[in-house]
Amino acid sequence: MSPLRWDVLLAGLVLALPVLALGLRGDFTAHEVAARLPWCLLAGWGAVALLRFAATPPRTPPARHRGAVPSPADPDPDPAA
């Protein structure tokens, strides 16, 4: 899964909003904000990956197809004929 998908970027942006707000308020310097933004993108990627894993239905094994020609071990399908 690419880290530049729209859902990953959106989740990273939502997680980056508090960091950006703290930077605007003056609690973080520009260097601290820039150091924390990649972690927000990584957390967004992890959250989206976890949600996709949880939402994907489990795979079922393919159904076994019976061939048109019965094998010699199979009983005769029409014993009256």
Image (tube, rainbow, N blue to C red):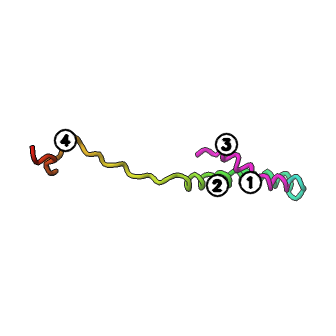
Considering only order in the chain, which callout, 3 or 1, is on the residue closer to the N terminus? 3
Query: What's the residue type where badge 4 is placed?
Result: Val
Q: Secondary structure at mark 4?
A: loop
The answer to whether the residues at label 1 and label 2 have Cβ atoms under 8 Å apart is yes
What residue would you read off at disc 3?
6
Mark nearer the N terminus (4 vs 1) = 1
Residue 9 percent location from the top left of the image: 69, 46
- Mark 3 belongs to which amino acid? Trp
Which mark is first along the chain, 2 or 1?
1
Where, quadrant-wise, is the C terminus in this rendering?
top left
Residue at 81 percent across and 55 percent down: it is 32
Residue 20 appears left or right of 47: right
Query: What residue type is disc 1 on?
Result: Leu
Q: Residues within 10 Å of mark 2 (few under 14, many from 20)?
A: some
Q: Which residue is mark 1?
A: 15
Q: Nearer the viewer, residue 42 or 55?
A: 55
Report the Cα–Cα distance between label 1 and label 3: 14 Å
Task: Name the secondary structure under disc 1.
Answer: helix
Extent of the magenta region = 1-22
Identified at 76% across, 54% down, the residue is 36
